[in-house]
Amino acid sequence: MNKSNISIKSHDGKIKTETGQLAVDVYSNEKEIVIIAPIAGVSEEDINLTINEEILVIRGDRQIPILNQNPENKPVTSECFWGPFSRAIVLPEYTEINKIEASFKKNILIITIPKNQQPQSRTIKIQHQE
């Protein structure tokens, strides 16, 4: 069974395919947000990062390497995630999307998103009107 590519039968009996969700860790400090995603089995050329307004999308596709060697191989146990994957992350308004940087080393994707002015909380006094 391909766990990253979930098949769902609709009411008409046809099979629909969904893309697997990429696991990420998100860290934050005063200056930046850092997103870390382990992505084994994919080269950096096969990872696509896009941003539309405040939504960062990570996409890619993990191909099963053994099927390229012999298509007759049948799985005995299948626990790995293969096939297309994606993850959409809504960024806060106080990020500088034009300064986002990404690196990929040892199968770890690291995305660094600088912060600009973070919104500050305050108490608003309600004025009495007559």
Image: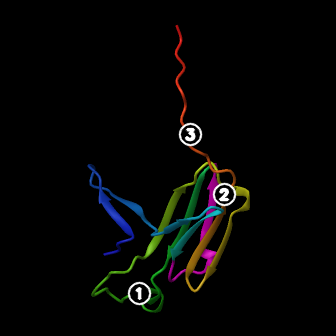
On the image, numbered disc 1 is attached to which residue? 71
Looking at the picture, tell me which residue is in the foreground, 108 or 49: 108
Find disc 3 in the rendering and name its residue.
Answer: 122
The structure residue drawn at horizontal position 32% and vertical position 82%, both measured from the top left corner, is 78
Instruction: Tell me the magenta residue range.
Output: 39-53
- Nearest the camera: 77 or 55? 55
Vertical placement of residue 15 versus 37, above or below: above
Q: Amino acid at mark 3?
A: Arg
Q: Nearer the viewer, mark 2 or mark 1?
A: 2
Q: CA distance from mark 2 to mark 1?
A: 48 Å
Q: Which residue extends farthest top?
A: 130
- Residue with the mark numbered 2: 115
> Between disc 3 and disc 2, whose residue precedes?
2
Residue 5 % position (x, y): 39, 68
Numbered disc 3: secondary structure: loop
Q: Residue at x 61, y 46 (%)?
A: 119
Q: Is residue 59 magenta?
A: no
The amino acid type found where label 1 is placed reads Pro
Whether label 3 touches label 2, CB < 8 Å: no
Image x and y of residue 118, in percent: 63, 50
- Residue at x-position 55% and y-position 83%: 107
Snapshot quadrant of residue 105: bottom right
- Badge 3: few (under 14), some or many (20 or more) residues near its Cα, within 10 Å? few
